[in-house]
Amino acid sequence: MRKKAKAVPEWLNSPLWSTPPLASTLADPFGTDFSPPPAPSPEPSPSVPPPPMREQAVDSHAGREGETREEDSAGAALRAHLLADFKAALSKKVVNMGELRRLACLGVPDGGGTDVRPLVWKLLLGYLPTERSLWPYELEKKRSQYSAYKDEFLLNPSEKLCRIEESKLSRKKELTGERNGLLPRSEVTNEEHPLSFGKSSLWNQYFQESEILEQIDRDVKRTHPDKSFFSAKSNQESLRRILIIFSRLYPSVRYVQGLNEVLAPLFYVLKNDLDTSNSTSAEADTFFCFVELISGFKNNYCKHLDNSRVGIRATLSKLSQLLKKHDEELWRHMEVITKVYPQYYAFRWITLLLTMEFSFNVCIHIWDAMLGDPEGSPDTLLRICCAMLILVRKRLLVGDFTANIQLLQHYPQTNIDHLLHIANRLRGTMPS
């Protein structure tokens, strides 16, 4: 006897979860322009009440067309109130991370002459300690450490060998004054020769990494070419240095194509800190925040873990299990009937942390919730991915393999508050 599919939760029956809102009736809450979505399903019944928003999320009031002045005033007042809450939380001698996470899940407010997001993200990522008095010391230590990393990892072998020899000569006072710091030909060892294939040869390592360096250069130049910020040469060089140092400092991950897209929101937020003492050191701060961010997802980037219980395939399997648990009808249609498996569409969602599925500004607001969620960024990301499927479930249920792949690889316009509301409803249900 065929097993009966689990009933769909009543809260999923709302048509608002099955079709993207029309641009003319419900604009994106963050005021971002999207390209026109594919032809939508029939409009939801006007009798269906809208779902709860992100518990008074800041930018959900950016609004519908024709919004009244009273609603605008209420939205501005709400943003000002939330900004005051953030400032109060950040001004404490010891920041209460539970309180800060709760506020971040509501949405970090923009504008008002004050931008708290750079500091909020540094705390949420664990780059800064909760005790305010330690911040100057930690920042100075980390920025000095990054400077040392640049000296160590950005020099070519010739420059490194020269520095090594200079260091040796400074410790050998018995050397004659005729020595000028350059190695005589007879003293160039096999390992130091540019044509050496030895494993410990700096030159051999340098040439082996040249392919990675070229990939980083190409990806950095392709990073958000529509935004002037990322077209600036100085910012491109910062991104390049961060990715090179990361690839050399963490060989288990090295550089995976697309990490530039994950790095971009971090660098953009920290570089635009209104405090110039922080913005001038944004490259160093971004590097360590990037390390903290990737550490939570690193198993998804390690090729040798792909087929393990913790690699990217296991992560995609968890997404499949999560969907089956909450919407077995949709799961069955996707994976049993049409054979649309998560690896066909969610690999990019997960490895690039949704940066390619939504506009840049909307992605930043999604990251507010992802970084602030107490369940942790990896589980929160999967809940958001599952919510993305549920949000377009009716379109998926009538689609075949081709239609559904196209829909999910070019995710349509949607209301981010709706999306995060669904993800919040899935809280505490991650498969083990």
Image: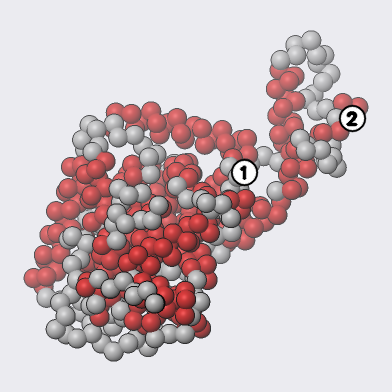
| Pick the front one: 371 or 232 | 371
Classify 10 Å Cα crowding around label 1: few (below 14), some (14-19), many (20 and above): few
Identified at 39% across, 31% down, the residue is: 138
Left or right: where does residue 74 sit relative to residue 303? left
**Residue wearing tag 2:** 185
Which image quadrant for residue 28?
bottom left
In the displayed structure, does residue 274 sit left or right of residue 54?
right
Mark 2 residue crowding within 10 angstroms, few (<14) / some (14–19) / many (20+): few
Which residue bears the numbered disc 1?
251
Provide the secondary structure element on which disc 2 rests: helix
Q: Residue lying at the far front in this picture: please name it.
A: 1
SS at mark 1?
loop
Q: Of the residues shown, which amino acid type is indicated by label 2?
A: Arg
Q: Nearer the viewer, mark 1 or mark 2?
A: 1
Q: Nearer the viewer, residue 388 or 181?
A: 388
Residue 221 shows in this picture: yes
Q: Which mark is residue 152?
A: none
**Amino acid beneath label 1:** Pro
Q: CA distance from mark 1 to mark 2?
A: 33 Å
Q: In the current view of this chain or complex, which residue is farthest to the right?
A: 186
Image position, residue 381 (x, y; %): 39, 58
Left or right: residue 256 versus residue 158 is: left
Q: Residue at x 14, y 53 (%)?
A: 81
Question: Which quarter of the figure is the N terminus placed in?
Answer: bottom left
Image: 24 above or below 121: below
**Residue drawn at 63 percent across, 35 percent down:** 152
Q: Position of residue 232 (x, y in %)?
A: 51, 58
For residue 166, which quarter of the picture?
Answer: top right
Q: Furthest residue to the left?
A: 70
Residues under numbered marks 1 and 2 in contact, where contact means CB atoms less than 8 Å apart: no
